[in-house]
Amino acid sequence: MRIGVLSYQGDVSEHMDMISSMGHEPVPVKTGRALSSVYGLILPGGESTCQGKLLKRFGLDEPIRERIRLGMPVFGTCTGAILLARTITGSDQPRLGTMDIEISRNAFGAQVDSFETELAIRGITDNARYGLGDFKALFIRAPLITSAGPSVDVMAAYAGRIVLARQRNMLACSFHPEMGEDDRIHKYFADMVEEYSNIAREVDA
Ligand code: GLN
């Protein structure tokens, strides 16, 4: 299955490696042409003002919104979650804005305040399909989802705050699941992509 990774900036290669190691085909996405060839898209961690500006400059923001609207699964990690958020606290920086969440950037402080913790994730760490047991999550200048609309499903929280959530075909997390060995969240996302690609192929047929 072809899964895209938005490739302007950030930890692109870590996501690409994880997609390949699961037996799928990673596709770097910088253009509309590459976008139209994938069944799912990962928005990697990095720097959200930079990535948001590039999305706009290369005219990829509207095509991505349209694909999301039509059902393509998207997975925003850290910066990617910021780009998905409808509201970014105190900022009008460019974004996709498709997900009904409010997010606060750098909510845990500076780079030195980065940390690792064990998380229970509803639907993943309690699901034998993916393997039971907590997920080691790495937070690097991480954002926090400070509020979520009624159709958003909260999947994980840290210190009472939302760090992983899903709304329909959109998945957003504030940490970095592409770093380390544990690929369970990527597997969960690949399942979303698989389900969508089956429907999309049927419609195309
Ligand atoms: N603080 C970064 C931002 O606002 C996100 C950090 C990350 O992706 N690790 O974009």
Image: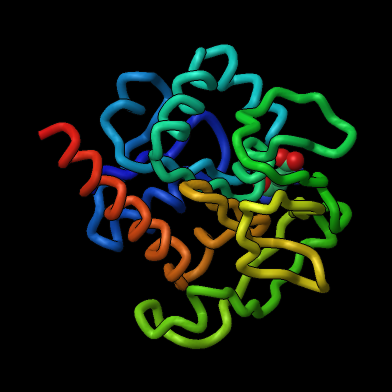
Quadrant for ligand 1 reads top right
The residue at the point 59 percent across, 16 percent down is 56
**Residue 8, position in %: x, y?**
52, 29
Near-viewer residue (50 or 159):
159
The residue at the point 41 percent across, 64 percent down is 188
Extreme residue in the left direction: 205
Q: Is residue 138 left or right of residue 30?
A: right
The residue at the point 19 percent across, 35 percent down is 203
Extreme residue in the front direction: 150
Q: Is residue 39 left or right of residue 166?
A: left
Q: State the scheme by which the image is colored.
A: rainbow
Q: Choose top left, top right, bottom left or bottom right for residue 40.
A: top left
Q: Choose top left, top right, bottom left or bottom right for residue 55.
A: top right
**Residue 76, position in %: x, y?**
56, 46
36 relative to 78, above or below: above
Rendered-image quadrant of the C terminus: top left
**How many marks do you count on the picture?**
0
The residue at the point 85 percent across, 58 percent down is 108
**Residue 3, position in %: x, y?**
33, 44
Near-viewer residue (10 or 74):
74
93 relative to 136, above or below: above
**Residue 161, position in %: x, y?**
80, 65
Near-viewer residue (100 or 189):
100
Near-viewer residue (43 or 99):
99
Residue 119 appearing in the image? yes
Residue 141 appearing in the image? no
